[in-house]
Image (cartoon, rainbow, N blue to C red):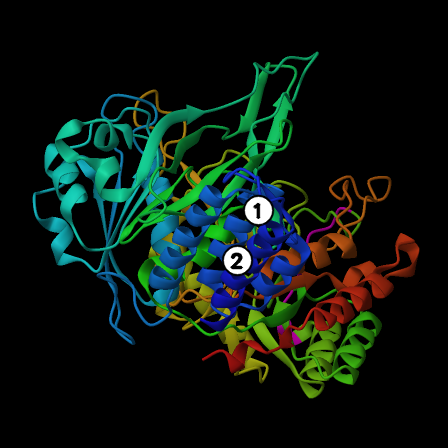
């Protein structure tokens, strides 16, 4: 608490100094200047992340000078932060060490193409809750029964559909429950504007309505702007936006719930969001005791520098489960198959061992070039027993501290281009990406057969200690993902989730959705039952389309390091990335090894501790 009192003391001293030098006839509303750099230093020293975030939001919202009335309001807000931000308590929260029971409610309208959108977001929320070993029940809000909130340690309502009807039973319970309740984006007006629930008087939050685009986008003005920059822990997390000139549409989620603090003794703006075009700021996350309001749905258009990370961190405070500040890093050598360069693998392994950096090798046990794309038109298959380069590379890497992750069985599917060449490492194995449907054989038993074949081939060649599974291209069917936990205690990946085991993405009504998810921290159990180690930063890419048409964009070491800096905002967030050894091949003409070293050294300098998958048990 000491830093909080120092923050308040600094404000008071500034006020006294201003009053002391003011003439005796000065008016009571006399303004005084703030020393914001000094206050910023005090905020930075506050150890409790929730208190620090709330103080940062408060400091960001303060004008350059204050009058006495404003000073009094600030003092009240500081008092509220000191009372509600303690790591030792959370009103109605989870007991220390317990697995929380959580209810996740979502909109599920009937007869629209968006019937399952809220369910998709609920799956993503459920996955993040897996970081806290939560027992999660997913339920359409329309099925809510009176009193249900009291049976859970926390409840989340995902307002995904504009003006979706909310049952009176839920509104009534939401207005009186003392259990943590987190409300996202839409439909808060059904609670806040209904005089029967005295929402503003109870919470100190005034709900105003919605904010969207500053103007209608057009080819002449493709990005008129919206509230797109969430400010948290001295970083700007920017919401994704892209304008499609051909269809005159946007790929973005610009709508924002507009709520504000009406009573600073009851409510606090925990995080703010800014309109990059106008400079205006509004609360992004508001808190009043056990009630939280998140002004949008942080699961749409997510990325490694997105406001999604802000929510992932604040989940600790919403649940009252305070994990210790801890920042670990992992690196994985990717798509290592039969044709891998032994020299490249030795060079990377030597460098990592010299830096005392543990690492893993994403291994493809069985090589297939079904169409002869890399073999002069003649199909080629290389089992692990004949994959001399791969075995030499693995043996060397293991001696240098590497660990094996099984990366598919063949990392390609049948004799089709799926979608590139039909070659291991290039194509999808457990999903028909060309038609965006499951493969014809798709079933849990079919997937288990392939997983067992890969493990058997590794074990037959002496590689018995496989640490984790990684889905090829991070996308497999729902049924193949459900097969994984039967054979692997751990996965190391991102995941695509579906709103049905056999999804129909083209239905006119109640179409299915696929949602891809990045994880900033370990998830003990996801929607498919998988334990997941995160890969959160991405990978280095070079535009070599003149050599390989599928490699047509750049993603630099600087991009990876920027992502790592944002990962620090999550109190137990990982900096985890992967690298393809083929970028060391001299004929590509790219600075692969130099950039690889730059990322390792840069992540180390940011303060992350390197760990191996086996250390994360």
Residue lying at 33% horizontally and 64% vertically, measured from the top left: 320
For the magenta stretch, what is the residue range?
377-385
Instruction: Measure how far apart labels 2 and 1 are at the Cα level.
Output: 18 Å
Q: Which of the pair 466/442 is nearer the observer?
A: 466
Q: Is residue 201 left or right of residue 215?
A: left
Can residue 443 be spotted in the picture?
no
According to the picture, the residue beneath numbered tag 1 turns out to be 60
Q: Is residue 385 left or right of residue 180?
A: right
Q: Position of residue 61 (x, y in %)?
A: 54, 43
Residue lying at 44% horizontally and 38% vertically, measured from the top left: 437
Q: Position of residue 68 (x, y in %)?
A: 48, 45
Mark 2 in CB contact with mark 1 (< 8 angstroms): no
Q: Which mark is residue 372?
A: none
Q: Quadrant of the N terminus?
A: bottom left
Q: Which of the pair 99/108 is nearer the observer?
A: 99
N-term-proximal mark, 2 vs 1: 2
Disc 1, SS: helix
């Amino acid at each position: 608490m000491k830093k909080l009192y120092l923050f308040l003391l600094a404000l008071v001293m500034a006020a006294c100094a201003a009053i002391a030098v003011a003439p005796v006839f000065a008016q009571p509303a006399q303004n005084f200047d703030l020393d914001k750099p000094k206050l910023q230093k005090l905020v930075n020293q506050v150890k409790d992340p929730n208190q620090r975030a709330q103080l940062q939001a408060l400091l960001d919202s303060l004008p350059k000078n204050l009058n006495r009335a404003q000073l009094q309001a600030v003092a009240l807000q500081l008092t509220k932060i000191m009372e509600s931000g303690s790591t030792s308590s959370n009103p109605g929260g989870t007991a220390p060490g317990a697995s929380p029971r959580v209810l996740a409610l979502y909109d599920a309208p009937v007869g629209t193409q968006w019937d399952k959108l809220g369910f998709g977001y609920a799956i993503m929320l459920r996955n993040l809750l897996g970081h806290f070993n939560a027992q999660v029940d997913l339920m359409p809000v329309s099925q809510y029964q009176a009193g249900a909130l009291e049976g859970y340690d926390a409840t989340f309502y995902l307002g995904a559909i504009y003006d979706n009807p909310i049952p009176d039973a839920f509104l009534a319970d939401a207005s009186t429950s003392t259990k943590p309740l987190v409300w996202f984006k839409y439909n808060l007006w059904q609670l806040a504007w209904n005089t029967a629930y005295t929402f503003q008087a109870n919470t100190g939050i005034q709900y105003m309505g919605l904010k969207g685009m500053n103007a209608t986008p057009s080819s002449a003005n493709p990005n008129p702007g919206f509230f797109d920059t969430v400010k948290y822990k001295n970083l700007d997390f920017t919401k994704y936006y892209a304008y499609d000139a051909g269809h005159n549409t946007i790929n973005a989620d610009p709508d924002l719930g507009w709520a504000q603090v009406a009573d600073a003794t009851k409510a606090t703006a925990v995080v703010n969001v800014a309109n990059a075009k106008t400079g205006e700021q509004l609360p992004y996350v508001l808190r009043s005791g056990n009630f939280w309001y998140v002004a949008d749905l942080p699961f749409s258009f997510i990325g490694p520098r997105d406001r999604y990370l802000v929510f992932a961190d604040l989940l600790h405070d919403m649940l009252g489960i305070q994990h210790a500040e801890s920042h670990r890093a992992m690196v994985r050598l990717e798509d290592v198959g039969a044709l891998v360069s032994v020299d490249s693998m030795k060079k990377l392994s030597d460098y990592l061992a010299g830096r005392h950096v543990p690492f893993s090798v994403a291994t493809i046990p069985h090589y297939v070039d079904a169409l002869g794309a890399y073999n002069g038109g003649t199909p080629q298959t290389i089992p692990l027993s004949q994959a001399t380069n791969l075995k030499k590379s693995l043996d060397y890497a293991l001696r240098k501290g590497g660990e094996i992750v099984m990366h598919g069985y063949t990392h390609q599917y049948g004799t089709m281009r799926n979608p590139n060449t039909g070659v291991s490492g290039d194509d999808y194995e457990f999903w028909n990406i060309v038609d965006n449907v499951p493969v014809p054989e798709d079933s849990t038993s079919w997937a288990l057969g392939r997983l067992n074949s890969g493990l058997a081939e590794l074990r037959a060649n002496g590689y018995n200690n496989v640490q984790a599974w990684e889905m090829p291209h991070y996308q497999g069917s729902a049924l193949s993902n459900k097969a994984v936990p039967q054979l692997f205690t751990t996965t190391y990946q991102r995941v695509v989730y579906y709103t049905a085991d056999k999804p129909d993405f083209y239905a006119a009504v109640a179409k299915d959705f696929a949602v891809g998810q990045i994880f900033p921290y370990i998830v003990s159990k996801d929607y498919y039952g998988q334990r997941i180690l995160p890969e959160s930063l991405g990978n280095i890419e070079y535009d070599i389309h003149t050599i390989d048409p599928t490699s047509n964009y750049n993603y630099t070491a600087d991009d990876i390091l920027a992502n790592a800096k944002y990962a620090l905002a999550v109190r137990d967030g990982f900096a985890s990335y992967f690298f393809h050894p083929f970028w060391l091949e001299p004929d590509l003409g790219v600075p692969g090894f130099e950039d690889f070293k730059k990322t390792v050294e840069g992540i180390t300098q940011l303060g992350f501790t390197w760990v191996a998958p086996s250390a994360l048990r």
